[in-house]
Amino acid sequence: MSKRTFTDEQVTDLSHNPYVQNVSPKAITYSDEFKVHFLAEWKKGKTARQIFMEASLPVEVLGERRIHTAANRWKKAYQESGITGVRDQRKGASGRPRLTELSTEEQLRRAKQENVLLRQENELLKKIDFAERRGNELSKQERFALIQQVTSRPGSLSVRRACLILEVSNSGYYAHFSPENQCKRQEKEEEDQRWRDRVLEAMAYKRVAKGSRAIVMYFLNTKKTVVNRKKVQRIMRKYGLQCPIRRANPYRKIAKATQEHRTVPNRLQRQFDQSAPKKVLLTDITYLRGKDGFLGYLSTILDGATKEVLAYAVADRITLDIALDTVKDLVAKHGEDLPAQALLHSDQGSHYTSPIFQKLVQKNGLTQSMSRRGNCWDNAPQESYFGHLKDEIPYEECHSLKELQSVIINYMDYYNHERGQWKLKKLTPVSYRDQLLKQVA
């Protein structure tokens, strides 16, 4: 089956999208900016469909096939050659060959230069990945500093290219390093250092330990100076000044959180298939052990009737976020289609008994159900799905979260759209879902 063509109206609408470089009735070319954006969102675990929709690129107009073809092409190019691999290398539309061939020396020189640029691009991406793995996101100021560090070397990336990779604007970068703004930052740094000395003086006064509140009152009552408590807290954080008394007790917080966790009844009672899509939702988390000590985690939400994976999240830490992100992914993709009081069934793990998780479930109109303690049969379809997944994907070859995400994304698309199941009348989960919906209609 050939790719769908665009109408004149669709061509006009698509051409107004900033992520579209060129569009005709038969073809569409995306900008390098969108390709970089796509890869950044893909590494966070989003699907191709979700990324295109969020970029105002309608799936119903482009077609699933065109989207998945482009996505797979970019992912393969990125894995083989880094960010440079997804750039549009075409210089023009003529396609005419060179009149003269490059000499061996020139080819070698260009190859070396390309390798230098690739290493610099990967260096930028690794620093972003490292920050994200620690749960931090690089601020704009930190990104600007990285760009300056990389682009100041001989034969380095252009500022424009580095800004594109780190998703900041050229104008913002140049404004940040303008003499006027550098002068302002220097003045602010000197002001902070003066306040650091004053805070240290307050902390040492009468040799009595003081926190931020006591320091504010010291300035007010002793120095007759009004200072905002948030400013004092910022200075203390910036220069690592800590009050030695009345620190938060982490064990008390853990004990309180444990007391707040609550289980809920098994409302499902193993009635997994209720002949209606999205009425029964099964969720669980499994670990995937890769190479060189890498350990990844996969959280999914499975449709009890169609066995379709409706939402998932991949992480290298088994924190509460992986369960929360899975529910958020479900709501983002299927929120409007979920029936009233759809049942979300899980085991009694701490993620699902967490008050934060339970509040998110209730907020989105879902009813929670839990298996009996230590009874895996109460969530059998989900356990079975994880068993098949581990048999069918090469997760043991993954060295990093990025590699595991790539494997999982490809498998999810294959599982939902191409992998037939005997118990689903030999249909794929998506085809079986469509058949059920036709029967209801």
Image (cartoon, grey):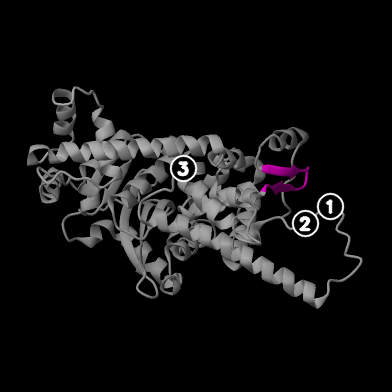
Q: Residue at x 52, y 62 (%)?
A: 123
Quadrant of the snapshot with the N terminus: bottom right
Q: In the figure, residue 278 lies in which quadrant?
A: top left
- Check disc 3 and report the residue beneath it: 333
**Residue 216 highlighted magenta (yes or no):** no
Provide residue 243's location: percent of width, then percent of height. Answer: 15, 43
Provide residue 357's location: percent of width, then percent of height. Answer: 26, 43
- Check disc 2 and report the residue beneath it: 90
- The local crowd at label 3, few if under 14, some if 14 to 19, many if 20 or more residues have their Cα within 10 Å, is some
Under tag 2, what secondary structure? Answer: loop
The type of residue carrying mark 3 is: Lys
- The local crowd at label 2, few if under 14, some if 14 to 19, many if 20 or more residues have their Cα within 10 Å, is few
- Separation of marks 2 and 3 at Cα, in angstroms: 35 Å
Answer yes or no: is residue 435 visible.
Answer: no
- Separation of marks 1 and 3 at Cα, in angstroms: 38 Å
Provide residue 289's location: percent of width, then percent of height. Answer: 35, 70
Comparing 10 with 372, the one in front is: 10
**Residue 25 highlighted magenta (yes or no):** yes
* Picture disc at residue 173: none
Range shown magenta: 20-31
Residue ranking furthest to the bottom: 104
Cβ atoms under marks 1 and 2 closer than 8 Å? yes
Under tag 1, what secondary structure? Answer: loop
Looking at the picture, does residue 278 appear above or below residue 398? Answer: above
* Picture disc at residue 93: 1
